[in-house]
């Protein structure tokens, strides 16, 4: 007999994950983020490679409380975020990957559309939450904006996936200490992981959340 009630399935999943987080010196809130990432991936191998900046959770709380926005690299991340929960905080979720000006800039500069989208967001990223789950070039560009143009997001969730640039972009994110972050070391990651991290933070500050797949 298999389980059919969403919250019972989630609770059982979290109980299975919990032992894999022991000994990692995580706070209770950090465990919530790690648990949801592991749950989304179906892979306890994530446990030792998740990195959470000491100020990431407080930065997220402050940004959400102030109704700040979320800027994503791809539609999969934008659509995966629990809009019903996020709407309670008053912000909006933006993605420019398919916009005409993004395509034009990418073609003109010979860069990826994800990179162009972040460049076009520019100063709009100041004080906001950035969630990157697919494109290493998007994360490289955000870090360039931080470094060269003094743009300061409130929080960067940077977990691009792949074998070309992903590990390097995330290493750069983890090496800097100006902007709080959530990341995953190495080649693992992806849009579902970025979504899991964002939703973990949303659910952390919204005790009225219902079923796991609530949108």
Image (cartoon, helix red, strand yellow):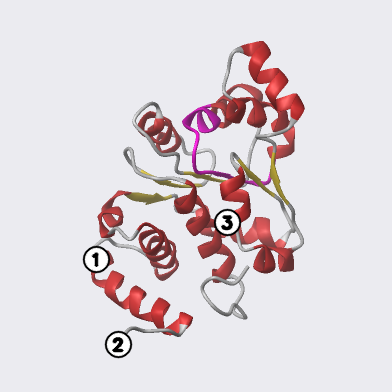
Q: Earlier in the sequence, mark 2 or mark 3?
A: 2
Marks 2 & 3, CB-CB < 8 Å contact: no
Picture residue at 33% right of the left edge, 38% below the top: 187
Residue 215: x and y, percent?
Answer: 63, 67
173 up-or-down from 193: above or below: above
Instruction: Look at 57% across and 49% down and name the residue there.
Output: 77
In three-dimensional space, the C-alpha distance between marks 1 and 3, rounded to whole angstroms, equals: 26 Å
Left or right for 33, reference 17: right
- State which region is magenta: 126-140
Query: Disc 2 to disc 3, how far (Cα)?
Result: 30 Å
Q: Secondary structure at mark 1?
A: helix
Residue picked out by circle 1: 20
Q: Residue 1 shows which numbered tag?
A: 2
**Dot in front, 1 or 3:** 3
N-terminal label among 1 and 3: 1
**Quadrant the N terminus occupies:** bottom left
Left or right of 8 on screen, residue 65: right
Q: Return the residue at label 3.
A: 80
């Amino acid at each position: 007999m298999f389980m059919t009630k969403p919250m019972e399935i989630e609770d059982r999943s979290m109980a299975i994950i919990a032992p894999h987080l022991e000994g990692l010196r995580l706070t209770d809130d950090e465990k919530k983020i790690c648990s949801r990432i592991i749950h989304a991936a179906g892979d306890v191998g994530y446990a030792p490679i998740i990195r959470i900046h000491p100020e990431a959770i407080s930065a997220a709380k402050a940004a959400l409380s102030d109704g700040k926005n979320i800027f994503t690299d791809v539609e999969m991340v934008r659509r995966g975020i629990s809009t019903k929960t996020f709407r309670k905080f008053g912000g909006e979720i933006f993605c420019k990957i398919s916009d005409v000006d993004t395509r034009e800039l990418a073609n003109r500069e010979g860069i990826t559309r994800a990179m162009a989208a972040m460049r076009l967001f520019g100063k709009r990223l100041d004080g906001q939450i950035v969630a990157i789950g697919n494109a290493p070039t998007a994360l490289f560009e955000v870090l360039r904006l931080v470094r060269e143009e003094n743009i300061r997001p409130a929080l960067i969730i940077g977990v691009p996936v792949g074998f070309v640039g992903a590990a390097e972009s995330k290493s750069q994110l983890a090496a800097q200490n100006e902007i709080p972050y959530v990341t995953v070391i190495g080649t693992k990651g992806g849009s579902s992981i970025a979504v899991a991290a964002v939703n973990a933070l949303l659910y952390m500050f919204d005790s009225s959340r219902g079923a796991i797949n609530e949108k």
